[in-house]
Image (cartoon, rainbow, N blue to C red):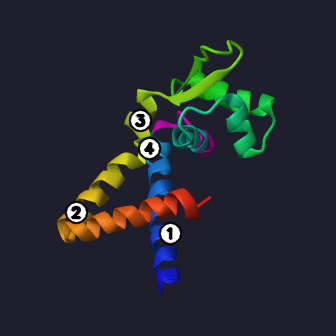
Amino acid sequence: MLDLYLDILYSKIKFNIYKNMCRGFDESGSLSLTEVFCAELICSMENPTVKEFAKFLQISSPNASYKIKNLVDKGYVKKVRSKDDKREYFLNVTEKYLRQYGTSEHTAKLMGEKIRNRFKPEDAEKFEEMIKIISDELVE
């Protein structure tokens, strides 16, 4: 049963992400779904370099640079020059992106509140410990 419930949980989280990615997509027309995915990936990777972004997607650096340039031009991503290596840039989503597409932090905060309200404090703490182990050790 654990496998089944993990699959259900994963599906619900995945569908929530997809829903958030598509929210506003048709109305604004400012980002393609691929661009929303790239911006969401940049947000999730927490300040990746262009090289890290390209490596993760298994695309060429010029292809990654093209995708990033479009997001920068539209105001959804910013490039921050590295203080150590002036040739390197870190990528961040902008407030404009966060306002339009949001982040998973809000959902996670609501879920955390529901867990703390529903379960005994010691059970919630044990669940927190288990989630940390799953995140740190079991999910690659």
Which-is-in-front pick, marks 2 and 1? 2
Where in the figure is residue 60, as x and y percent of width and height? 81, 35
Judging by the rendered image, the residue that carries numbered circle 1 is 11
Relative to 57, 115 lies left or right: left
Per the image, the residue denoted by label 2 is 116
Residue 7 image offset from top left, x and y in percent: 52, 75
Res 33 → quadrant: top right
Q: Position of residue 103 (x, y in %)?
A: 41, 44
CA gap between label 2 and label 3 equals 26 Å
Q: Are marks 3 and 4 in contact (CB under 8 Å)?
A: no
SS category of the residue bearing label 4:
loop
Mark 3 or mark 4: name the one nearer the start of the chain. Answer: 4
Residue shown at 61% from the left, 17% from the top: 82
At horizontal 40% and vertical 42% (from top left) the residue drawn is: 102
Q: Earlier in the sequence, mark 2 or mark 1?
A: 1
Q: Is residue 1 left or right of residue 81?
A: left
Vertical arrangement, residue 56 with respect to residue 51, above or below:
below
Let me know if residue 52 is in the magenta part.
no
Question: Given contact means CB atoms under 8 Å apart, are the residues at marks 2 and 1 in contact?
Answer: no
Circle 4 residue: 24
Badge 1, how many Cα within 10 Å: few under 14, some, many 20+? few
Residue in the foreground of this view, choosing between 10 and 37: 10
Marks 3, 4: nearer the viewer: 3
Magenta extent: 28-35
Image coords of residue 122 (percent x, y): 24, 68
Residue 104 vs residue 62: left or right? left
| Distance from the alpha carbon under mark 3 to that under mark 1 | 23 Å
Gap between marks 2 and 1 measured at Cα: 23 Å
Q: Which mark is residue 124?
A: none
